[in-house]
């Protein structure tokens, strides 16, 4: 997925591996990366999955996954073949909890919300 | 391309058609869209071209193209088959002037800057 975050300095955008874990998008990044630091300053994240013509946008708030939540960490490792700890000592598992989900297919099509304000509407 | 912008409220991210016009990325969006409004507040843009495993990131400042610059508008229309005016009355042609360009191929590879602080280094 593509994940956009922001700080006072402006936007950031990186590609990240992720796991859709029932109700959240799980991803790992260093707490000291620009993405990690932005999320400490502003929890808002906007993720895009798909390509530029057929895509899903997920907006919501991002927080670190509780270290006691070993089930999520295991699910992430099982799916992606690595754990945040494999990548580096400050790598952290984060969860994006959706407040809105939007689908887009081609420019000409109307975009369509399938979740708004945390409620599924499709 | 994917274009991330930011305002005080957080990040925004949208897919956009673009033209690489010699030294700038040209794209069109409504001045009243979230992207357009963000750029009035914070000119920083971060664009990604490619897919999540083989990509180029372009960071820089974004400004509206001077309405007298008909050559850029014509180049955009020739390449993309539409003009900002075709899309809507408040659609505006913007230019992202790169200050940094970074390439990424797969997670395991080192990322590589090919432009930094406006200077080509590769």
Image: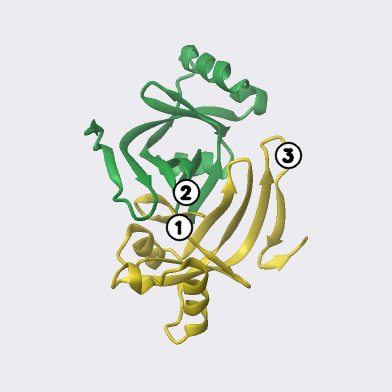
Chain colours: A yellow, B green
Report if residue B88 is visible in the image.
no
Labels 1 and 2 touching (C-beta < 8 A): yes
> Where is residue A22 shown, x and y percent of the image?
63, 73
The tag on residue A109 is 3
Q: Which residue is mark 2?
A: B52
The numbered mark, 1 or 3, whose residue comes first in the sequence reads: 1
Please rate how many residues cluster around mark 2, counting C-alpha atoms within 10 Å: few if below 14, some from 14 to 19, many from 20. many
CA–CA distance between discs 2 and 3?
24 Å
Labels 2 and 3 touching (C-beta < 8 A): no
Residue drawn at x 43%, y 72% as measured from the top left: A93
Tell me the quarter of the picture where residue A7 sits: bottom left
Q: Is residue B83 left or right of residue B95?
A: right
CA–CA distance between discs 1 and 3?
27 Å
> Where is residue A27 shown, x and y percent of the image?
47, 66
| Residue A69, placed above or below residue A3 | below
Report if residue B18 is visible in the image.
yes
Q: The disc numbered 3 marks a residue on which chain?
A: A
Q: Nearer the viewer, mark 1 or mark 3?
A: 1
Tell me the quarter of the picture where residue B66 sits: top left
Q: The disc numbered 1 marks a residue on which chain?
A: A
Q: The disc numbered 2 marks a residue on which chain?
A: B
Give A74 or B34, whichever is nearer the viewer.
Answer: A74
Q: Is residue A122 left or right of residue B37?
A: right
Residue drawn at x 41%, y 64% as measured from the top left: A39
> Where is residue A50 shown, x and y percent of the image?
59, 49
As helix, strand or loop, the secondary structure at mark 3 comes to: loop
Q: Which residue is mark 1?
A: A16
Please rate how many residues cluster around mark 3, counting C-alpha atoms within 10 Å: few if below 14, some from 14 to 19, many from 20. few
Q: Nearer the viewer, mark 2 or mark 3?
A: 2
* Discs 1 and 2 share one subunit: no
As helix, strand or loop, the secondary structure at mark 1 comes to: loop
């Amino acid at each position: 997925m593509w994940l956009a975050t922001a700080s006072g300095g402006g936007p950031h955008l990186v590609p990240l591996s992720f796991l859709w874990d029932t109700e959240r998008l799980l991803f790992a990044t260093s707490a000291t990366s620009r993405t990690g630091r932005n999320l400490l300053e502003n929890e808002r994240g906007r993720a895009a999955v798909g390509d530029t013509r057929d895509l899903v946008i997920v907006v919501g708030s991002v927080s670190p996954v509780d270290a006691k939540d070993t089930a999520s960490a295991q699910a992430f490792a099982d799916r992606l073949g690595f754990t945040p700890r494999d990548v580096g000592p400050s790598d952290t598992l984060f969860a994006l909890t959706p407040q809105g989900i939007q689908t887009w297919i081609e420019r000409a099509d109307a975009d369509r919300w399938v979740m708004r304000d945390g409620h599924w509407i499709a």
